[in-house]
């Protein structure tokens, strides 16, 4: 597998992580069967993609990028879907996560 494909799989895993977190919210403590099953499916997909990307990418970098995408993406989706706070300091800290994530990608290119 090429490095480009590994990075694409890692980004896809990060995006699935965001959808997984949202599906957990909608599953309401696994009390809603459809959302619960979707969350398990998304979890399986993101773990598989992350694992495949680790065949090529350094584990520390991949894990940090994956969690950065998941954390920043989940906060932004929470703002949009669940009317969670969007104060300037919160956005500043999310910005730092994004900068760090991009920095790890650039530093590992």
Image (tube, rainbow, N blue to C red):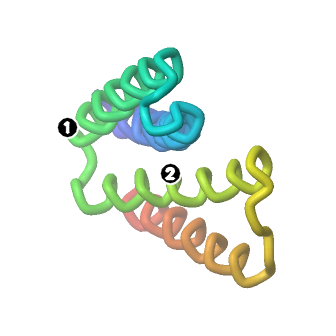
Q: In this view, does 102 lie to the left or right of 87?
A: left
Q: Is residue 77 in sight in this rendering? A: yes
**Residue 68 or 20: which is nearer the viewer?**
20
Closest to the camera, between mark 1 and mark 2, is 2
**Picture coordinates of residue 75 (x, y %)?**
63, 58
Label ID, residue 67:
none
Placement of the N terminus among the 4 image quadrants:
top left
Q: In this view, does 104 lie to the left or right of 94?
A: left
* Picture residue at 59% right of the left edge, 59% below the top: 72
Q: Mark 2 points at which residue?
A: 70
**Picture coordinates of residue 2 (x, y %)?**
33, 32
**Picture coordinates of residue 60 (x, y %)?**
25, 62
Label ID, residue 55:
1
Q: Which of marks 1 and 2 is nearer the N terminus?
A: 1
Distance between the alpha carbons at the discs numbered 1 and 2: 20 Å
**Picture coordinates of residue 18 (x, y %)?**
54, 43
* Picture residue at 41% right of the left edge, 40% below the top: 10
Determine which quarter of the picture holds residue 29. Answer: top left
Q: In this view, does 74 lie to the left or right of 79?
A: left
Determine the secondary structure under disc 1: loop
Q: Do the residues labelled 1 and 2 touch (CB within 8 Å)?
A: no
């Amino acid at each position: 597998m090429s490095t480009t494909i590994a990075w694409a799989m890692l980004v896809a895993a990060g995006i699935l992580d965001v959808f997984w977190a949202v599906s957990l919210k909608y599953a309401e403590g696994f009390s809603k069967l459809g959302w619960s099953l979707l969350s398990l499916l998304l979890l399986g997909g993101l773990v598989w993609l992350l694992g495949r990307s680790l065949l090529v990418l350094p584990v520390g970098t991949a894990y940090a990028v994956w969690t950065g995408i998941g954390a920043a993406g989940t906060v932004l989706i929470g703002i949009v879907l669940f009317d969670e706070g969007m104060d300037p300091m919160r956005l500043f800290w999310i910005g730092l996560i994004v900068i760090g994530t991009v920095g790890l990608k650039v530093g590992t290119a």
